[in-house]
Image (cartoon, grey):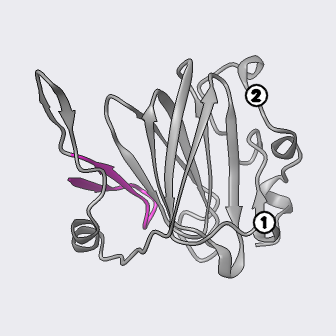
């Protein structure tokens, strides 16, 4: 497993070593010991989540606040997504900056998202199965989010706006400037 830093401190791209042969392929999707040795972070994942989405479905940008913040390790099990994170850590040198990466079932990359980030993704393929490990439980009253088309973030979601599909809840999310962080 190879782990690469991004320009945002604490956010890592995890690249598994894939073994292919005539039968198919195999890879180790996570190894806590290797992750800790390379990143210096001790993460205890306690909840796994999975979603299935059609092309153009945008989920996010979500985060939890206070003691219910979550670190996540995310990946596209099937299909392709554009995964986006926004640094919401007020003391960070990349505060309010975003990072994006294409995750798919060909590159098998994963993104480690530390606590203190908003997270979202859009499905670029006809459908996608998206999986993520969390180090804290979901807590409804601690959830919040940023609207996907916030002009202060200017995120390129890679699809035409006419293709983007949002939940009713995600249509009502706040602009980053209106959040009390």
Could you say which is closer to the camera, residue 19 or residue 9?
Answer: 19
Give me the C-alpha separation between circle 2 and circle 1: 22 Å
Residue 157, can we see it?
no
62 displayed left or right of 79: right
The quarter holding residue 19 reads top left
Q: In terms of secondary structure, where does tag 2 sit?
A: loop
Instruction: Report which residue position mark 2 lands on.
Output: 165
Residue at point 50% right, 52% down? 132
Q: Position of residue 128 (x, y in %)?
A: 53, 29
Please rate how many residues cluster around mark 2, counting C-alpha atoms within 10 Å: few if below 14, some from 14 to 19, many from 20.
some
Could you say which is closer to the camera, residue 151 or residue 15?
Answer: 15
Magenta residue check for 99: no
The quarter holding residue 38 reads bottom left
Q: Position of residue 124 (x, y in %)?
A: 55, 24
Could you say which is closer to the camera, residue 169 or residue 13?
Answer: 169
Vertical side of 6 occupied by 100: above or below: above
Furthest residue toward front: 23
Could you say which is closer to the camera, residue 112 or residue 177?
Answer: 112
Furthest residue toward left: 21
Vertical side of 122 occupied by 54: above or below: above
Instruction: Report which residue position mark 1 lands on.
Output: 140
Residue at point 58% right, 68% down? 70
Report the magenta residues as a range. 1-16
Q: Position of residue 13 (x, y in %)?
A: 36, 51
């Amino acid at each position: 497993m190879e782990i690469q830093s991004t320009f945002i401190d604490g956010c890592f791209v995890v690249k598994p070593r894939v073994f292919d042969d005539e039968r198919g392929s195999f890879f180790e999707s996570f190894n806590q010991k290797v992750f800790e040795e390379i990143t210096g972070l001790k993460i205890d994942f306690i909840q796994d989540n999975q979603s299935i989405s059609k092309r153009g479905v945008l989920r996010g940008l979500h985060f939890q606040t206070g003691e219910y913040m979550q670190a996540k390790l995310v990946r596209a099990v099937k299909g392709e997504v554009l995964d986006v994170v926004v640094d919401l850590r007020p003391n960070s040198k990349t505060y309010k900056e975003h990072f994006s990466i294409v995750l798919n079932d060909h590159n098998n990359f994963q993104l480690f998202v530390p606590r203190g980030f908003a997270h979202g993704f859009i499905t670029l393929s006809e459908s996608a199965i998206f999986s993520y490990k969390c180090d804290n439980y979901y807590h409804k009253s601690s959830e919040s989010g940023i609207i996907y088309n916030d002009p202060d973030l200017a995120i390129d979601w890679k699809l035409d706006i006419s293709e983007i599909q949002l939940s009713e809840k995600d249509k009502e999310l706040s602009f980053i400037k209106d959040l009390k962080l």
